């Protein structure tokens, strides 16, 4: 996708900071990478991570932002959240660390993510128009507003690591490509969902423009035409790189983006802070046009 997808009419605004504030948090550039792409939870690996963490200065915590109007309670605890949705494969490996305790791993933390499909539709909100010219959501096999695709939880292992199998998100007006995230602690898995506890962090992950625009030239993304908002013009991304949620992305195959990507990021949290992001204003804009399900706030910031 080239310049015809850049929306220059949107002025970037920094996202509003939700109550809970900014604290010192886990950068872990090296340790985060090593831990995020290691499936092992052995004592040796944990010891190496701890040693590296102790020698690494923590960055500023990623600022919590609005959860947007497309959040749904009751997401399933599962690794693969695609539910058959087509798109470029994306493996997310995320590391949760305690920003108040030397950036040590937070085992048992529940990481919840949700995002739109390749054409800009969210499960549960399939009547919301993603803008531009997009196929009907039903053409990809999902018509019901009670669908749960591209939503789910994972519970962090001993190294604070979770892994998701999903697809590269699409886009919708007026937002750039993004994934929503909440980090929960204190709850437990029950009947396939996560119950209890509290939300410590609410935020969003972002994708480099050059990678996103290349992906959007591929099927099924290319069937959605219109004005794609770049990072510089997004209402939520504030230009802070990883500390603002920008994912590091590695291609599975350097010459074939259709093979997919691996993305990683370290999330520093304060386990004593509660920050849901619900109802927060600023930095979101209006949701895509259309009729959301009954009870959805029409004046909420965009997802």
Image (cartoon, rainbow, N blue to C red):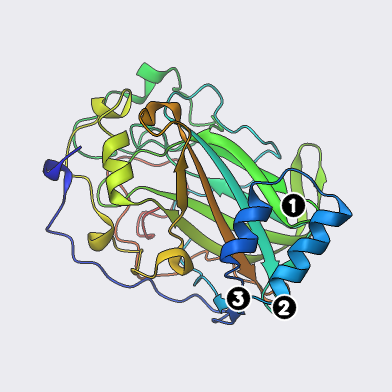
Characterize the local packing of mark 3: few (<14), some (14-19) or many (20 or more) Cα atoms within 10 angstroms. many
Give coordinates of residue 26: x percent, y percent. 61, 71
The residue that disc 2 covers is: 102
Query: In the shown orientation, is residue 162 left or right of residue 213?
Result: right
Residue 25: assigned label:
3
Disc 2 to disc 3, C-alpha distance: 8 Å
The residue that disc 1 covers is: 156
Which label lies toward us, 2 or 1? 2
- The structure residue drawn at horizontal position 17% and vertical position 43%, both measured from the top left corner, is 5
Query: In the shown orientation, is residue 158 left or right of residue 120?
Result: right
Query: In the shown orientation, is residue 189 left or right of residue 94?
Result: right
Disc 2 to disc 1, C-alpha distance: 18 Å
Picture quarter containing residue 186?
A: bottom right
The residue closer to the viewer here, 121 or 128, is: 121
Q: Earlier in the sequence, mark 1 or mark 3?
A: 3
User: Can the viewer see residue 106 in this picture?
Assistant: no
Give coordinates of residue 278: x percent, y percent. 52, 64
The residue closer to the viewer here, 285 or 183, is: 183
- Mark 2 residue element: loop
The image shows residue 243, relative to residue 204, as above or below, that is below
């Amino acid at each position: 996708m080239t310049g015809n997808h850049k929306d220059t009419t949107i002025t970037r605004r920094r996202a509003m900071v939700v109550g809970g504030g900014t604290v010192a948090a886990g950068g872990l550039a090296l340790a985060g990478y090593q831990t995020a792409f290691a499936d092992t939870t052995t004592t040796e690996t944990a010891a190496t991570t701890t040693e590296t963490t102790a020698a690494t200065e923590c960055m500023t915590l990623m600022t919590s932002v609005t959860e947007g109007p497309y959040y749904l309670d009751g997401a399933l605890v599962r690794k693969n959240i695609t539910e058959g949705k087509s798109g470029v494969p994306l493996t997310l490996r995320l590391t949760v660390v305690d920003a108040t305790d030397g950036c040590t791993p937070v085992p048992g933390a529940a990481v919840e993510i949700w995002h739109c499909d390749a054409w800009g539709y969210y499960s549960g909100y399939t009547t919301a128009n993603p803008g531009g010219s997009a196929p009907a959501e039903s053409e990809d096999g999902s018509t019901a507003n009670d669908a749960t695709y591209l939503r789910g939880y994972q519970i962090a292992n001993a190294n604070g690591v979770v892994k998701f199998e999903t697809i590269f998100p699409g886009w919708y007006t007026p937002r750039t490509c993004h994934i929503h995230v909440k980090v929960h602690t204190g709850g437990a898995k029950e009947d396939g969902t996560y119950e209890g506890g509290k939300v410590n962090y609410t935020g969003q992950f972002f994708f480099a423009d050059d990678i996103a625009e290349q992906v959007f030239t591929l099927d099924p993304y290319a069937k959605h035409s219109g004005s794609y908002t770049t990072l510089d013009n997004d209402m939520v991304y504030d230009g802070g790189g990883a500390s603002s949620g920008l994912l590091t992305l590695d291609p599975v195959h350097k010459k074939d983006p259709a093979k997919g990507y691996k993305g990683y990021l370290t999330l520093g949290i304060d386990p004593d802070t509660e920050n849901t992001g619900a109802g927060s204003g600023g930095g979101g804009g209006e949701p895509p046009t259309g009729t959301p399900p009954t009870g959805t706030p029409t004046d909420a910031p965009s997802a």
